Image (cartoon, grey):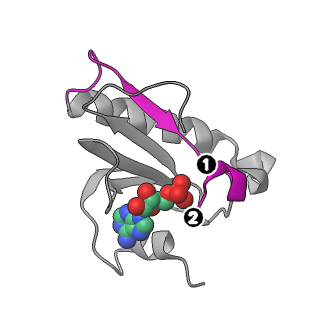
Amino acid sequence: MDCIFCKIANKEIPARIAFESDRVIAFHDLFPQAPTHVLVIPKTHISTLNDVPAEQAPVLGELVSAATTIAKELGLADAGYRVVMNCNADGGQSVYHIHLHLLGGRHMAWPPG
Ligand code: AMP
């Protein structure tokens, strides 16, 4: 399967890894939208949030849990941070392997553009 995030998870292409567990890996975004911008992904390929099988739903909690761990490790927890998951075209998804964006290090407006 030609999926760039699978290749990162399999260490076939380089990335700046921020966190890794049995089922989850996180790495710094190549085009950061904030001083800290980390992507948290399941190692298993799932294309979009619409495609998460019921038996794999717990991995979504693991993505959030990993994000909070990383936020604390990177010193973002007290000031705050944002977690975002984009789904399909209207959601702004460009890479079709689900991922959670962890953004921090600056104030973020709401609502997003
Ligand atoms: P999304 O638009 O929600 O699908 O987010 C995809 C993200 O992946 C974007 O923020 C990209 O900058 C990021 N990205 C794409 N390719 C890479 C890569 N090779 N390493 C790190 N981040 C990447």
Q: Nearer the viewer, residue 101 or 43?
A: 101
Q: Up-down: is 29 above or below 35? A: below
Q: Position of residue 111 (x, y in %)?
A: 56, 27
Image position of 106 (left or right of 1): left
Q: Position of residue 64 (x, y in %)?
A: 50, 34
Q: Up-down: is 13 above or below 23? A: below
> Which callout, 2 or 1, points at the residue further toward the start of the chain?
1
Q: Amino acid at mark 2?
A: Ser
Tag 2 near tag 1, CB within 8 Å: yes
Image position of 44 (left or right of 48): left
- Quick one: which residue is furthest to the top in this view? 78
Q: Position of residue 41 (x, y in %)?
A: 49, 54
Q: Quadrant of residue 80?
A: top left
Q: Which residues are magenta?
A: 75-94
Q: Quadrant of ligand 1?
A: bottom left
Q: Nearer the viewer, residue 72 or 22?
A: 72
Q: CA distance from mark 2 to mark 1?
A: 9 Å
Q: Up-down: is 98 above or below 3? A: above
Name which residue lies at 27% across and 57% down.
17
Q: Which residue is mark 2?
A: 94
Residue 86, which numbered label? Answer: 1
Is residue 7 part of the magenta span, yes or no?
no
Q: Nearer the viewer, residue 23 or 109?
A: 109
Is residue 88 part of the magenta span, yes or no?
yes
Residue 21 seen in the figure? no
Q: Secondary structure at mark 2?
A: loop
Quarter in which the C terminus is drawn:
top right
State whether the magenta stretch is mostly helix, strand or loop.
loop
Residue 36 seen in the figure? yes
Q: Up-down: is 111 above or below 31? A: above
